[in-house]
Image (tube, rainbow, N blue to C red):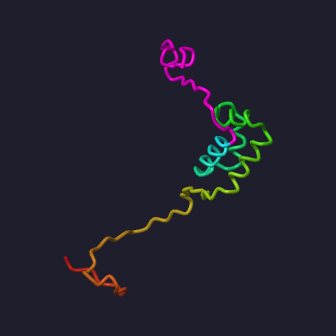
Amino acid sequence: MDDTTNHNTRPKEPEHPQILDGGVVDGDPAFMLHCLAEDYLNAGTTHTEIDRMSRDPFYQALYAAREAVGDEMADTIIERAACRSSAMHIKVWESTALDVPVDLTVSRNKTRNPNDNTPTEPRDA
């Protein structure tokens, strides 16, 4: 590796300490796009969101993979990954509209057989 590609010899840039520079490596951009799409799908990202993200330069790896393979092939790769994905999508929310105050009583039950489903009376303290 010569000095032009060795990132250890670059001068320090104190005004940009958090900037990461990536290098180009040999590999299959179509396979990389497929792996990225699977990772996002398994994390719960939808096919439509991944397609949008791959067109946004902010998502550098997805964007670069789309640029490398072309729009038509990228759409096919993302679609195939989505067809094979089995990630569960759920939506959770809290609502206070139906909250009803309740009284909660905690008591110690008598020792009983775990296979016996009959209710027991609390012991006197």
Q: Position of residue 89 (x, y in %)?
A: 61, 57
In the rendered image, the residue lying farthest to the front is 1
**Residue 22 lies in the magenta stretch:** yes
Q: Is residue 109 above or below residue 25?
A: below
Q: Residue 64's x, y, as percent?
A: 68, 32
Q: Position of residue 92 (x, y in %)?
A: 57, 56
Q: Residue at x 61, y 46 (%)?
A: 40
Examine the image and state in which quarter residue 123 appears. bottom left
Count the labels in the image. 0
Residue drawn where x is 67% and y is 57% of the image: 84
- Taking the image as shown, residue 53 lies to the left or right of residue 10, namely right
Residue at the location (55% across, 57% down)? Answer: 95
Residue 56 coordinates in the image, percent (x, y): 70, 34
Name the chief secondary structure element in magenta: loop
- In this rendering, the answer to whether 18 lies above or below 118 is above
Whether 54 is drawn above or below 86: the answer is: above
Q: Which residues are magenta?
A: 1-30
Question: Which residue appears farthest toward the top when viewing the image?
Answer: 11
Picture residue at 31% right of the left edge, 70% below the top: 106
